[in-house]
């Protein structure tokens, strides 16, 4: 399962969540505004920026503001 780091006000996060749900891709969502450790992780993988959505994959890799096709490719879903 992927983990999506987000905020409540992020339009890109809302869009990606709905796309993942329509595609049947399970995800866990963590709001970085309520979880300081997650905010630190997001900053670590984004050069010090709290850029969301940041998606972490089971293999430990991460993508920032990915498209649905990028998520599918990373998960090797056709």
Image (cartoon, rainbow, N blue to C red):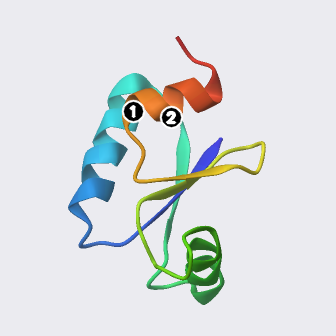
Residue 69 x/y as whole percent: 42, 27
Specify whether 77 is left or right of 51: right
Establish if 6 lies above or below 13: below
Q: Label 1, secondary structure: give it.
A: helix
Q: Label 2, secondary structure: give it.
A: helix
Q: Which residue ends up furthest to the front in the rendered image?
A: 47
Q: Which residue ends up furthest to the bottom in the rendered image?
A: 36
Quarter location, residue 11: bottom left
Quarter location, residue 45: bottom right
| Residue drawn at x 41%, y 59% as measured from the top left | 53
47 or 11: which is nearer to us? 47
Residue 35 x/y as whole percent: 56, 83
Specify whether 6 is left or right of 18: right
Specify whether 7 is left or right of 38: left
Mark 1 and mark 2: span between their CA atoms? 5 Å
Residue that label 1 marks: 68
| Residue drawn at x 56%, y 75% as measured from the top left | 47
Specify whether 24 is left or right of 38: left
Residue 13 x/y as whole percent: 32, 57
Residue 21 x/y as whole percent: 38, 34
Establish if 64 lies above or below 67: below
Q: How crowded is mark 1: few (under 14 residues within 10 Å), some or many (20 or more)?
A: some
Q: How crowded is mark 2: few (under 14 residues within 10 Å), some or many (20 or more)?
A: many
Q: Which mark is residue 71?
A: 2
Asked if labels 2 and 1 touch by Cβ distance under 8 angstroms, the answer is yes
């Amino acid at each position: 399962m992927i983990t999506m780091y987000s905020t409540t006000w992020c339009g890109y996060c809302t869009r990606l969540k709905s796309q993942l749900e329509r595609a049947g891709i399970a995800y866990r969502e963590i709001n970085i505004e309520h979880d300081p450790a997650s905010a630190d992780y997001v900053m670590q993988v984004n050069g010090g920026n709290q850029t969301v959505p940041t998606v972490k994959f089971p293999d430990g890799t991460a993508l920032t503001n990915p498209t649905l096709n990028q998520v599918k490719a990373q998960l090797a879903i056709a």
